[in-house]
Structure formats: structure tokens, C-alpha cells
Amino acid sequence: QVQLVESGGGLVQAGGSLRLSCAASGRTFSNFHMSWFRQAPGKERDFVAAIGWSDGSTYYADSVKGRFTISRDNAKNTVDLQMNSLKPEDTAVYYCAAARPYSGSLRGVSNYAYWGQGTQVTVSS
């Protein structure tokens, strides 16, 4: 089992920044791909960013590319999402997720075995 706990959400004005953090416990953190997803009210849960377990390769949704940065610290068992130039359309509950290697596309919700409880991000215009 892997337990994931997100923090760092809140209310920010458009153009501002937030940093989300996800703390993991349980199985060896470094053996998992780690990602962030988000879900706005009435919408599906969407991929935001991922970081690979082996070489730290990063992947981003087109909507956040150039504004968000995902990073991980395997010594601290944390994965962060730095969000800059926030827009009202970034408003959502943000979820941290962990996937085992070779589970399929990192953009697929169903490929993730473990999820955090989510943290709310609200961007005002």
C-alpha cells in the first residue's frame, strides 16, 4: 500500500502561483511513477503532469505546459507541483497519484493504483 497526502491548495488570484506537495508513505516511493490530476466540478478527472520512476522524465498536459513544473524528492518521499501564471480555468481539486511501472499510459486515470484525497485550488479572476 501507498498512502498519499496532498497539501498546499488554496485561493489565489489569476496570474499568481501555488505549490502543491504530496507526501507518500508505505511502499518504496522511488519505484512508482508519480502524477498530478485535477477534477473540476461536473467534469472528468484530467491528467496534469507526471514524473517517471526511473529517470525522472516529466510529462505535461498541453494546457499547463510552460506554467507548471512537477518534481520529486525520493529521499523525502515527496512530489511537488509548482503552478505559475494560474488561470481561472485551473480551478479544480488536485489529486496526487502513484502508478507502478509498466501500468500503461501515464495520462490514464485507470492506470494508477493509489490516490490522495485531493486538495482544492481556486483561481479567482
Image (tube, rainbow, N blue to C red):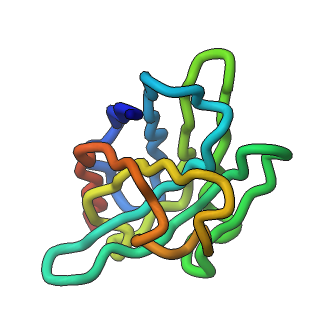
| Residue situated furthest top in the rendering | 75
Q: Is residue 39 left or right of residue 14?
A: left
| Residue situated furthest left in the rendering | 42
Q: Is residue 117 left or right of residue 75?
A: left
- Return the residue nearer the eye: 107 or 118: 107
Position in image of residue 94 (x %, y %): 34, 55
Q: Is residue 7 visible?
A: no
Q: Is residue 125 above or below residue 84?
A: below
Q: Is residue 49 above or below residue 110?
A: above
Quarter of the rendering containing residue 125: bottom left
Quarter of the rendering containing residue 4: top left
Q: Residue placed at 27% from the left, 64% from the top?
A: 92
Quadrant (top left, top right, bottom left, bottom right) of the N terminus? top left
- Return the residue nearer the eye: 19 or 116: 116
Q: Is residue 56 left or right of residue 22?
A: right
Position in image of residue 120 (x %, y %): 23, 51
Q: Is residue 44 visible?
A: yes
Position in image of residue 61 (x %, y %): 59, 75
Q: Is residue 25 above or below residue 70?
A: above
